[in-house]
Image: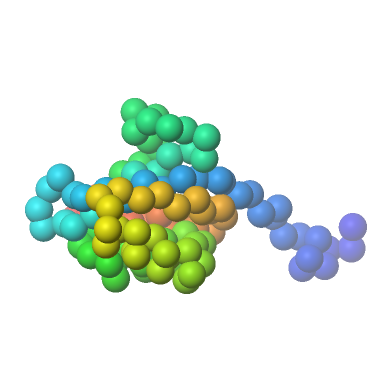
């Protein structure tokens, strides 16, 4: 090991998450995003739930987590005709930090 930047990098850890989008059950939010492990079917095993104000807020969150633009557009199209939709995102460690900042209590 010669200490090159490539060799010093930490391995990228991916987390295969399914994100279920549903109508929010609290105002003023439009959507509830429930984070589930990729193989989970029920909300009782949810890793996290976030509330977002609308399409734009949801799109930014999903893009920050690593979802592609095409996947996000498809999800938004589905939500125009159905109450619930799901997207699978391979969330990398860096995106987990973004999520942690969004969920920290604000003063």
Hey, which quadrant is residue 35 in on the image?
top left
Establish if 26 lies above or below 39.
below
Q: Residue at x 34, y 28 (%)?
A: 44
Q: Residue at x 72, y 60 (%)?
A: 9
Q: Quadrant of the C terminus?
A: bottom left
Establish if 33 lies above or below 43.
below
Residue 104 in view here: no
Front position in the image: 86 or 64 = 86
Establish if 18 lies above or below 76.
above
* Residue 18 locus on image (x, y percent): 46, 45
Q: Residue at x 23, y 65 (%)?
A: 54
- Whether residue 13 sits left or right of residue 34 in the image: it is right
* Residue 81 locus on image (x, y percent): 27, 58
Q: Quadrant of the N terminus?
A: bottom right
- Whether residue 15 sits left or right of residue 10 in the image: it is left
- Whether residue 91 sits left or right of residue 43 in the image: it is right
* Residue 57 locus on image (x, y percent): 29, 66
* Residue 14 locus on image (x, y percent): 61, 49
């Amino acid at each position: 090991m010669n200490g090159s930047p490539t060799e010093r990098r930490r391995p990228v850890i991916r987390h295969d998450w399914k994100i279920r989008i549903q109508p929010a059950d609290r105002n003023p939010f439009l959507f509830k995003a429930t984070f589930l492990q990729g193989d989970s079917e029920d909300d009782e095993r949810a890793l996290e739930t976030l509330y977002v104000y609308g399409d734009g807020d949801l799109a930014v969150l999903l893009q920050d987590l690593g979802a592609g633009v095409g996947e996000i557009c498809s999800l938004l199209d589905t939500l125009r005709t159905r109450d619930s939709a799901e997207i699978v995102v391979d969330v990398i460690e860096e995106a987990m930090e973004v999520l942690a900042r969004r969920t920290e209590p604000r003063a």
